[in-house]
Image (cartoon, rainbow, N blue to C red):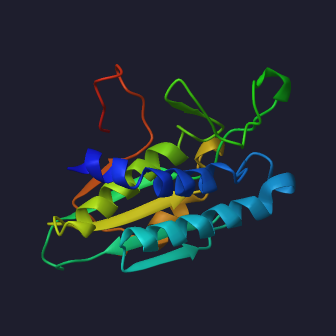
Amino acid sequence: MIKDYIKENQERILDELFSLIRIPSVSAQPEKHGKDMIRCAERWQELLLMAGVDKAEVMPTEGNPVVYGEKIIDPAAKTVLIYGHYDVMPAEPFELWNSEPFEPVIKDGRIWARGADDDKGQSFIQAKAFEYIVKNNLLKHNIKFILEGEEEIGSPSLSAFCSKHKELLKCDIILVSDTSMIAKDIPCLQ
């Protein structure tokens, strides 16, 4: 069961998630965080490969890069495309934080840091679920990931990227890993 898998691998999983959160990938501040955007995209590429995709790459756009990953088990099988983003909102004003915004802190069973939820945390959950499915030979569909670096500024490069790569992104369903939950025990799919 996935809960057991997470429990058994908790330290590694938290280290991986924290490695993403610690990168201040603030798309709204390119003069300050341009290199961090690339570093975060490259870290996502590594994490997707570790999770079990057969191919992962950091692909250029007019703005911040897109991370694409895939595991194709059968060209005739249905394909799920998982969308997420790795950019975060600025952390300012810093004086409103009780801890460093890009240094994760666990308090009362929750992770507090910029990006722990929107959207590094949510996308990371999808990658870990994929990892579990692959490691336990449960994968029945092709999986593709697309992680963009401009959602927090309106995704100005995403449309052109999707138009240019529509065959690569072809799928039967899209799972969006960037949405709210109605309640603590009621997850939402978009």
Along the line of sight, the residue nearer the viewer: 122 or 81: 122
Position of residue 101 relative to residue 181, above or below, is: below
Q: Position of residue 29 (x, y in %)?
A: 80, 48
Left or right of 1, for residue 190: right
- Where in the figure is residue 94, as x and y percent of width and height? 83, 29
Total numbered labels: 0
Q: Farthest front residue?
A: 8
What residue is shown at x 26% (from left), y 68% (from top)?
A: 135
At x 62% / y 56%, what residue is drawn?
A: 19
- Tell me if residue 190 comes above or below residue 75 in the rendering: above
Can residue 93 be seen in this snapshot?
Answer: no
The C terminus - image quarter: top left
Residue 40, compared with residue 32, is above or below; it is: below
In the image, what residue occupies the spot 45% across and 44% down? 122
The residue located at (53%, 70%) in the rendering is 45
Q: Quick one: 158 or 93, which is closer to the camera?
A: 93
Q: Name which quarter of the figure residue 44 lies in.
A: bottom right
Q: Position of residue 146 (x, y in %)?
A: 45, 62
